[in-house]
Amino acid sequence: MRKSTNMFNCLLNVISRETDIMFSRPIYLYGTVLVLAFCAIFFVSLMYQGLPQRVPVGVIDKDNSYLSRTAIKQIEAMQGIEIAHRYGSYHEARLAMQQGKIYGFIEFPEDLYIKTVNGLRPTVPVYYTEAYMIPGTLVYRNFLQIANVLNAGVRRTTMRAKGVSEAEIMPALQPITIDTHSINNPWSSYSIYLISIIWPGILSLCIIVMTVFTIGFELKSKTTPDLIEKAGGSIFNALSGKLLPYFIIYLLLGFSYVILAYKIFGFPLMGPVWVMLLNIAMLVLASHAVGLFFIGLFPVLRDALSAASLYSVLALSMCGMTYPVEMMIPPMQGFAQLFPLRQYYLIYVKWAMLNSGISDVWINMLGMCIFFFLPFLIIRRLKDAMVKLNYPTK
């Protein structure tokens, strides 16, 4: 009983010591609360509409006919794009696109109407930039929709002139009607698509880097013997007490994100919210474990920070959000499993988007739990570094 009491007292001593350090250095506040709060506000406000609504485009109308004017009116009525300027030539429009004033333009050539009514199939050039993926894709999609509407309108007018009834025209124009339903993100919202993974990714990055920094700075300052003494000589008490305040802060931030995202902002969630709370808690714990692994593997602050930062940034690319892991070469598919964020992403997709059930999610939860054991691989090396200070200082 006395041993347990002494262990608890030592743990409280380390927690008290770390709390004093946290409030004495602003960098700890920046790395725990302010960075994540700023990122949350920034991304939510940046994409609060979910999708860009009025992407600026240009128009060149060399025909100035009823057909071209009708097409321009339809472009003006579209929600996704907005005519920012009308140009007199291709070179003017191209220069404006290169300067970033517009993201695409459409050119209606001369004799568009005459060639159309004579069945000569005129060509309407469309130019758009893919240097910006989202605006370029939206411009292309809307211009393509305009082309389809114009084709249908011309064919409808021609068939009417030939005496075809309205009941026969529509089946000829569109024999098959496609009814599209986006079941997981019906709003096509980039806010849902990006924030659901980017913010947890930044959370994981902050945890890994701050875990490395807090212990690495102690090593650099040669204050780890005092830390071990406060912990009663136990490396377990020292690491647990030092990281527990950060774990609680990051856990509360993670829970706040889950509640805000799925209960207040209405992000898609097919299953109960408790699984996502468990998912974020496991990500926080796994990220701490990864940070301990790096500072134990490289017990020099600058080396551990460099390795941990590179690893954390790669996680955003390897989790599968931007590019499907299944489409990567086999070695990279295996490499992607070395990131906790990959397991978090799979749990998120299976549970929040697809509602696959625990039977499909448990394997990824098990994969997340494997990261919890990483500190045991370097615990002896880290203890030697903290007690004996036997590591390079330059």
Image (cartoon, rainbow, N blue to C red):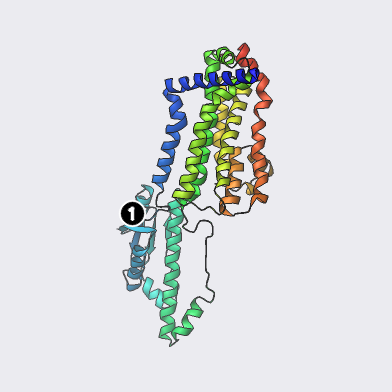
**Where the C terminus falls, by quadrant?**
top right
78 sits to left or right of 381: left
On the image, the x and y values in percent for residue 215 come to 55, 21
| Residue 307 pos. (x, y %) | 58, 28
Question: Which residue is at 32% across, 73% downward?
Answer: 66
> Residue at the spot x=31%, y=69% of the render?
64
Total numbered labels placed on residues in the image: 1
47 lies above or below 177: above
Question: Neighbour class for label 1 at 10 Å: few (<14), some, many (≥20)?
Answer: some
Q: Is residue 130 visible?
A: no
As displayed, is residue 333 above or below residue 168?
Answer: above
* Furthest-front residue in this view: 1
Q: Quadrant of residue 297?
A: top right
Q: In which quadrant of the rendered view does residue 365 lie?
A: top right
Q: Position of residue 98 (x, y in %)?
A: 38, 48
Q: Nearer the viewer, residue 299 or 74?
A: 299
In the image, taking residue 95 as reference, residue 10 lies left or right, namely right
Q: Is residue 157 visible?
A: yes
Return the residue nearer the eye: 312 or 389: 389
Residue 190: image x %, image y %?
46, 51
The N terminus lies in quadrant: top right
User: Which of 330/340 is in front?
Assistant: 340
The residue tagged 1 is: 92
> Farthest residue in the bottom direction?
163
Q: Residue at x 52, y 40 (%)?
A: 200
Left or right position of 177 against 327:
left
Residue 132 in the image: above or below residue 208:
below
What type is the residue that disc 1 sits on? Glu
**What SS does tag 1 mark?**
helix
